[in-house]
Image (spheres, helix red, strand yellow):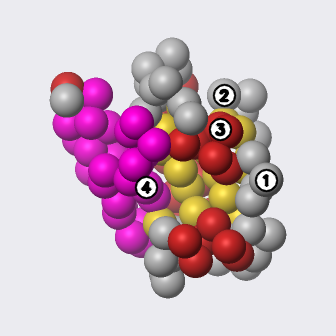
Amino acid sequence: MPENITTVDQSSFDKIVLESSKPVLVDFWAPWCGPCRMVSPIVEELAKDYNGKVEFAKVNVDEAPFVASKYSIMSIPTIMIFKDGKPVEHVIGFKPKDQFKKLLDVVLAK
């Protein structure tokens, strides 16, 4: 995994995601999920494209069930964008890279 994507668990979620001074794109995923494996390279590309502007985190829902439950993650992959400690955008399922870019650009423009 690229160095600018942080693996987050239940104990580190608040500090890394909610307390970040930058927007954070969180990829809720699981290793057994085929669509999650399709989204992963897109998230890695976005992490390079938005390096320094947006933080990137991955949450394995099997290893962090309380975090997944707190944000009502029922389907994966779910991509959530947090800003100022609050979820501001989310996308469920596989989508093309430009859809994620549009969401990030909207969040960064606010």
User: Between marks 2 and 3, how big is the CA–CA gap?
Assistant: 12 Å
User: Between marks 3 and 1, how big is the CA–CA gap?
Assistant: 10 Å
Q: Which residues are magenta?
A: 79-108
Mark 3 belongs to which amino acid? Ile
- Disc sitting over residue 80 in the figure: 4
Label 1's element?
A: loop
- Disc sitting over residue 16 in the figure: 3
2 or 1: mark nearer the eye? 1
Q: Nearer the viewer, residue 94 or 23?
A: 23
Residue at image coords 42%, 71%: 93
The mark nearer the N terminus, 3 or 1, is: 1
Residue at image coords 64%, 47%: 14
Mark 1 belongs to which amino acid? Ser
Image quarter hosting the N terminus: top right
How far from the left and from the top, in percent, is residue 53?
44, 20
Label 2's element?
A: loop
Mark 2 belongs to which amino acid? Asn
Residue at numbered disc 1 = 11
